[in-house]
Structure formats: C-alpha cells, structure tokens
Image (cartoon, rainbow, N blue to C red):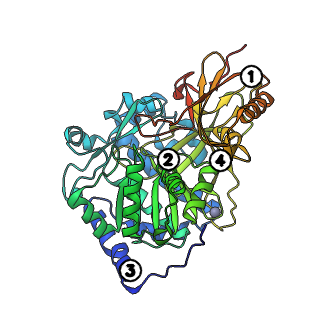
Amino acid sequence: MAVQESSPLNLIDNINQFLVGRISFPAVNFVLNRGDILRRYHELLASELYSQEALRELQFQKLQAALKHASTWIPFYARRFKDIGLAPEDIRTLEDLRLIPPLDRQDVINHRLELVDTRCHDSVSIADRGRHQPGLPVLFAKFRRHKLVRNTSTGSTGSPTVFYDDGTTTALNWVHELRLKHWFGIEPGAKEARMTGISTAYSATGMRRSVRECFWNQMILPGVFLSDREYQFSLRKLHKFKPRVLWGATPALTGLARYIQRTNEDIAPCRPELVISWAAPLYEHEKALLAEVFQSPVTNLYGSREVGHIAMLCPHGSLHVNQENYIVELEETGGNEGKGGPGKVLVTQLNSSPMPFLRYRIGDLAELGPSACACGRSLGVLKSILGRFGEVFKTNDGRLIEPTFWCLAFMVGRQSQEVERFQVIYRPNNRILFRIIRRPGYSEQTEADLRSLMDKHFQSSVQFDFEYVSEIKPQPSGKCPIVLNEIEPEEKGLAELQST
Ligand SMILES: [Zn+2]
C-alpha cells in the first residue's frame, strides 16, 4: 500500500477554501435559517478547553433556558411537568434532570404535534404537505414564516419517527462537524465528498448539485442501495473532485473500501485526508479497513437524525460528547442498578428548537469513560457504544454480549482472512444464525473453530446455525446491521435468552 503523499494546497485551492469556509458556506446557511455557524464554531474551540466544572455550569445555564422554553411552548412537556408537579425552577442541579421522565421513540410517534412549539403548529401541516424530500431545506427559510423541515428517522424495527427542524439542529450539526475536522487539522471550506442516503438526506441533482459544489465545496455521492455501478461512479467523481474529506454512513464507506480492495483501484490521486463515518457504529475491523484502504485517519460521528451529532471521535480515540450542546446520561438497565456500567443512552438537547428532545432514549446502550484524554480536551467521553438495545444479547448467566463480540469472533485473527462479511441473527428458541460470505480460505475447519469458540462462551445453551450466502442484503432503510434481532423489537429491551 502506498504511503500517502503530502499534498500542499496550491494558492487557488487555499483561496477557494477560505472564501467558501468564511463567506459562502456560512452565508448560504444563514439564508437557510442556520445562522451563526462560524461564531459558534469558534466558541466551541474555546469551550472544549474549559474545565469539566465550567462545562457543567455552562450546561446547567443552557438547561434552565431549555426547560423554560419546553414548559412554555411545548404542550407535551407543559402537561408532563404538570402531571409530575414539576416547574423548571425545581431543577437546581444537572442531577435534578432525573426528575423528568425519559422520552421514548413511541412518545415521539404518538405525540408528534404536541412535541412541536405551539407557535409553529401551522408550519407543521405545511411541512407535512410539502413535496420536498425529507430533510431538504426550505429555500430562503430565514425570511419565511414557515421554516419547518419534515424529516424521518428509521429505527431497526422499521417504524419511522417523524420530526421537524427549523434549521437549529442542522446548524449545530455543521458546527460540530467543523469542530471535528479542526481536530484533524482541516479548516472550514475544505473540499468534502459526502456519501449520503437518498431517502433521508440531500439527493442533489442538476442545478442544486453544482450550487452545492460551488458554494459549499461539497460533492454529493450515492449513499444507499449501492452496487459496483455506484462505487465505480463515485470513484470517477472522487478522482475529478479530489476531496480532502470523505464523509458517509459506515456501510457506504466500507462498501466503497471493499470495492477498491476488490478491484485494485489506484486511489492515490484522490486519497482523502480524513474519513468521517456516521449513522452507524464504526467497529474496529471497519475502522481498520477504512484506514488501510484510504491511508488516512478515520473518525466517527455518533448521534441520531432526531437529535444531531452527540459525540465525536478525537484523534486520540476518545468519543467526546459535544457537552456544550447535549447532556448525555446513562439509564441503568435491569440488573445493574447502582453498579454503574452499561446503560441506555438518554440525550437532552440544550438548544431550544421547535421540537426539543429532553432525556430522549435514542435506543443505544453505552458506557461512560474517564473524561481525561491525551488530546487535552475535557469534554466528557463515552467509553463505548455497545449497540442498539436489541443488538445486545443477554446470556443465561447475565453477561451482555455486544456486537463488538461478534466482530472480534469473525473479523479478527485468522477468521478475518476467511470471512468476507457476516451477520448475526438472534432467533427464538435459543437459536442464533450466522449468515456468512466466505472468502476462498474458509473451510470446514473454520466452521468447527467458530463452533468451539461459541461453545466456550455460551456453554452449549444456544444452538448456532450457519448459512453461507453470496450477498447480505441491506434493510429497506439502507442500513445493513451486523445484528438482527428476531426475538423482540429493539424498544422492548435486550435480547434475552429464553430459559432452557
Ligand atoms: Zn480526546
């Protein structure tokens, strides 16, 4: 593998990056009602060096404003606070936030309109009737009365959550992405190729595409339902555009990387300086694949479409919470009360938007880590994202088997030479199915080795079935999860073994 050549920007590129980063990107976003991007970006670069105490004080001040906004303008929270006899002033510390019941995905589905600022209710019906694709901005939103954009998020169960944004959350996403790129030495305005999902993000065509490339230095590439045709197309575009950043959902990036490996494409002339994965966990074997193929640092944005970018992976490997704008709590799961350890992620947005999420269960299990990081930032750290609720398997003796376990079993060591890809399916009656795309070296011995590894961990309490396939098809949402849970929907909890 060739070593990355240093690629000093020439003068024209420098000027172009400066003009886009300092003028046209913030200006166009201002028109789309996503104001103050540069100012907030610089504020974050200062606040990430605050002490943990100062960050918590900042969080508390913003929380007070967010609670006041929610109790005044959001009928769902006004009623919820009344039901539990709570006023925003009763929250006197960050810990008091626990007095507010968590918000579930089902709450969002059932009470969609009540969760929207009453001042925007007439905009909801306009957004619902709009012919825009989900997530597409309202042109000149800054100067319009109806600014709301309808967007959807699909859980792995497939039931969509509809939510609305007036630009507040999108602006924050941009600001956090600028901070992330700064961590890797890339300043605003750098050329970026974005492999984005067509159904839930921009699918810019024609004029919109060229405007975006010209004013934002962003090129849009296909992001879902990808085949060799799309990868080939994307590579042609990458060679022409030469982005410094390659951004995309993890499955899209790894799919492109595998295609490059398989076809021996020479990507030296268009190698990015940073790869940013998003929308799905980035497992170690996937990170290693991307680093090997693109010969560049690989980072990850953790979050959800509803609430935005919650945490980001720094160059030292810590997943830092964007603490100035989010409070992340871990809700203890059955069996670990008072013991710390993994818990369900609850997220509170600290910036008042037309549809604020307070203590939102986004559906993941995670562990908190120590906030000290070699990068010097004191932002809190998520030690690990264990996976979606339904992806974590609870064994008879109470151990949690997280998706990382399957990655280690299939993609590390000798197996990595023999397994191309895999999927694990939890099935009723204590059965787990392994769906495997084999590499040429895969033999009967490989299966025997995997069976004995499983027996060691599961003490024969689970029956393992192997299915060999030539393709692992993505779900309708475009996601291609490592784990599928056919035992029970993700929202109901961990995939528990039935007693034998
Ligand atoms: Zn760090």
Name the mark on residue 13.
3
Q: Which residue is mark 2?
A: 251
Dot 2 lies on which element? Answer: helix
Q: Quadrant of residue 406?
A: top right
The picture places residue 315, in percent across and down from the top left corner, at: 62, 65
Amino acid residing under circle 1: Asn
* Residue 289 showing in the rendered view: yes
Q: Residues within 10 Å of mark 3 (few under 14, many from 20)?
A: some
User: In this picture, is 188 found above or below 158?
Assistant: below
Q: What is the CA distance from the residue labelled 4 to the residue labelled 1?
A: 23 Å
Residue 450 pos. (x, y %): 73, 33
- Report which residue position mark 1 lands on: 396
| Residue 98 left/right relative to 367 | left
Q: Marks 4 and 3, Cα distance to the nearest angstrom?
A: 38 Å
Quadrant including the C terminus: top right
Observer-nearest of 332 and 7: 7
Numbered badge on residue 384 = 4
Q: 125 left or right of 36?
A: left
Marks 4 and 2, the one that precedes in the sequence: 2
Q: Residue at x 70, y 36 (%)?
A: 443
Query: Most extreme residue toward the bottom, as rendered?
Result: 11
Estimate the spatial distance between the alpha carbons at disc 3 and disc 2, rounded to whole Å.
30 Å
